[in-house]
Amino acid sequence: MALSLRVSFWATLLSLPLGVFVAYALARWQFWGKHLLNGLVHLPLILPPVVTGYLLLLTFGRKGLVGQFLDDWFGIVLAFRWTGAVLAAAVMAFPLMVRAIRLAIEAVDPKLEEAASTLGAPRLWVFATVTLPLILPGIVAGAILAFAKAMGEFGATITFVSNIPGQTQTLPSAIYAFLQVPGGDGQAFRLVVVAIVVAMAALLLAEWVSRAIAKRISGR
């Protein structure tokens, strides 16, 4: 459980800046390859998680193009490490995060941003002072949903980092391991209950926080 929380926390935290940037690009910018980028972002939702995990292994494994570079130059190894579980969880949770933030950005009237720009404010300042406060509920909701998704990630994680107790065994992996052992049903069921409680709490928290921030921004 502690490992799952750590993996989910870092997966959400590290992917959040990129998630905001990609969501803003998809919502506001027009550029060549926009539909391709949108497809790539949402591809993990469509592909079997095992396929995603295998692609991560080919790319970030010790012999992979990126993985070998990271190992040779920086001594960073992701495959079969808890840090690899963070990467797998982040990739699988990224589409949910981007979608929630993108919907929040698209709900903001572009004329508000244009008005700030006409007053001479730089684009980055407009985003920080106008757009960001308005989309904050969406960012919070996206982050919480991504955290919950990362907590429940199994297929890509077990393919990329295996199921090593104490090192890469997250909550779903532990449930799977208990189900493979005679008499492990009781322990598996307890973990299932924990997983359901955490997922439901995350959904309710996302809804509550989003409403609270939206109400505060609107001044009601």
Image (cartoon, helix red, strand yellow):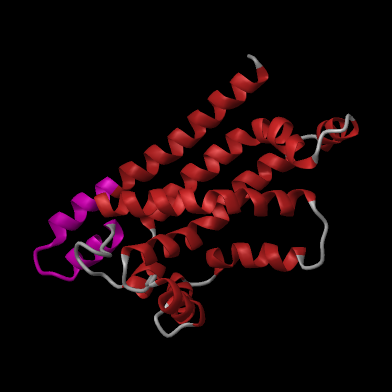
Query: Which quadrant of the rendered structure holds the C terminus?
Result: top right
Magenta: main secondary structure equals helix
Q: What number of labels is visible?
A: 0
Residue, far top: 220
Q: Can residue 154 be seen in this snapshot?
A: no
Near-viewer residue (182 or 87) = 87
Task: Quadrant for residue 95, please give it.
Answer: bottom right
User: At 55% across and 31% down in the image, what residue appears?
Assistant: 210
Q: Can residue 32 be seen in this snapshot?
A: yes
List x then y, in percent, for residue 155. 38, 69
Horizontal arrangement in the rendering, residue 2 relative to residue 105 (left or right): left
Horizontal arrangement in the rendering, residue 189 relative to residue 53 (left or right): left
Horizontal arrangement in the rendering, residue 133 relative to residue 149 (left or right): right
Q: Which residues are magenta?
A: 171-194
Q: Is 111 inside the magenta-drawn segment?
A: no
Near-viewer residue (66 or 150) = 66
Residue, far bottom: 63
User: At 43% across and 60% down in the image, what residue appears?
Assistant: 89
Asked if residue 93 is positioned above or below residue 77 in the image, the reply reads above
Residue, far left: 183
Asked if residue 19 is positioned above or below residue 112 in the image, the reply reads below
User: At 73% across and 54% down in the image, what residue appears?
Assistant: 26
List x then y, in percent, for residue 126. 76, 35
Residue, far front: 73
Asked if residue 32 is positioned above or below residue 94 in the image, the reply reads below
Task: Quadrant for residue 179, please give it.
Answer: bottom left
Horizontal arrangement in the rendering, residue 61 relative to residue 31 (left or right): left
User: At 54% across and 24% down in the image, what residue appears?
Assistant: 212
List x then y, in percent, for residue 3. 27, 54
